[in-house]
Image (tube, helix red, strand yellow):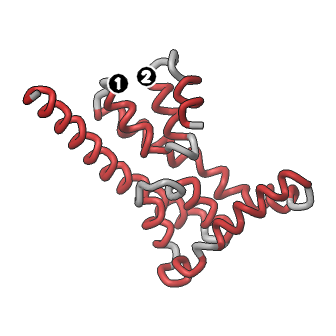
């Protein structure tokens, strides 16, 4: 799926590539920042665009997931997808009970597969967390993930340049 997405956005302007990758559930800032850096986008443009897009793209999930889930629960295919999403969110229940709303921050901040703002917003919606608390936690989590991903990406680029010079 990632290859398909990268192929679909290949000819778009750099800013649109970052916007689409930041908004996509698969990549979020974990994908958009390395791609933006690799394609030469300055950090001063890349980071605000990636962070804002990632956060704004998940707000409909926080606001409307439960409403949509209620209406689609009895549909054959979509009901199954909704059930899986709810099961995924409920699997985080122990973490949410232990750490409360800050569990969403930690979960979003870890830049690994199936973590991030999309899954964090789903967890927040399923557990009925207050909107502005969720927005704060998503924002903090995305910023922390951005710092981690940017640091690792820049370190990788620097290491590659060192190996290129040494080789």
Residue at the spot x=29%, y=34% of the render?
Answer: 43
- Tag 1: Cα neighbours inside 10 Å, few (<14), some, or many (≥20)? few
Coordinates of residue 158 in the picture (x, y in percent) = 17, 36
Of 154 and 57, the residue lying toward us: 154
Tag 2 near tag 1, CB within 8 Å = yes
Quarter occupied by the C terminus: top left
Residue 77: percent from the left, percent from the top?
86, 51
Tell me what residue is drawn at x 59 percent, y 50 percent: 58
Q: Name the quadrant containing residue 154.
A: top left
User: Which of the two residues, 108 or 35, is positioned nearer the viewer here?
Assistant: 35
- x 32%, y 29%: residue: 38
Describe residue 135's horizontal placement relative to residue 165 as left or right.
right
User: What is the number of the mark on residue 98?
Assistant: none
The quarter in which the N terminus is drawn is top right
Find disc 2 in the rendering and name its residue: 14
Residue that extends furthest to the front in the rendered view of this protein: 167
Query: Residue 145: horizontal and vertical position, in percent?
Result: 38, 54
As helix, strand or loop, the secondary structure at mark 2 comes to helix
Determine which quarter of the picture holds residue 123: bottom right
Q: Position of residue 114 (x, y in %)?
A: 54, 56
Closer to the chain start, of discs 2 and 1, is: 2
Determine the residue located farthest toward the bottom in the rendered image.
98
Q: Secondary structure at mark 1?
A: loop
Q: Residue drawn 44% across and 44% down?
A: 29
């Amino acid at each position: 799926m990632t290859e398909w997405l990268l192929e679909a956005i290949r000819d778009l302007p750099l800013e649109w590539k970052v916007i689409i990758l930041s908004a996509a559930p698969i990549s979020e800032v974990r994908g958009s920042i390395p791609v933006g850096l690799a394609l030469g986008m300055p950090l001063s443009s890349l980071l605000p665009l990636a962070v804002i897009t990632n956060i704004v793209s998940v707000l409909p999930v926080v606001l409307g997931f439960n409403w949509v889930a209620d209406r689609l629960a009895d549909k054959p295919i979509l009901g199954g997808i909704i059930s899986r999403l709810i099961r995924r969110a409920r699997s985080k229940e122990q973490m949410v009970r232990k750490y409360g709303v800050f569990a969403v921050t930690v979960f979003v901040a870890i830049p690994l597969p199936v973590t991030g703002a999309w899954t964090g917003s789903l967890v927040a919606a399923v557990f009925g967390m207050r909107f502005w608390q969720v927005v704060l936690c998503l924002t903090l989590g995305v910023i922390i993930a951005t710092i981690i991903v940017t640091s690792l990406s820049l370190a990788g680029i620097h290491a590659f340049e060192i190996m290129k010079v040494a080789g």
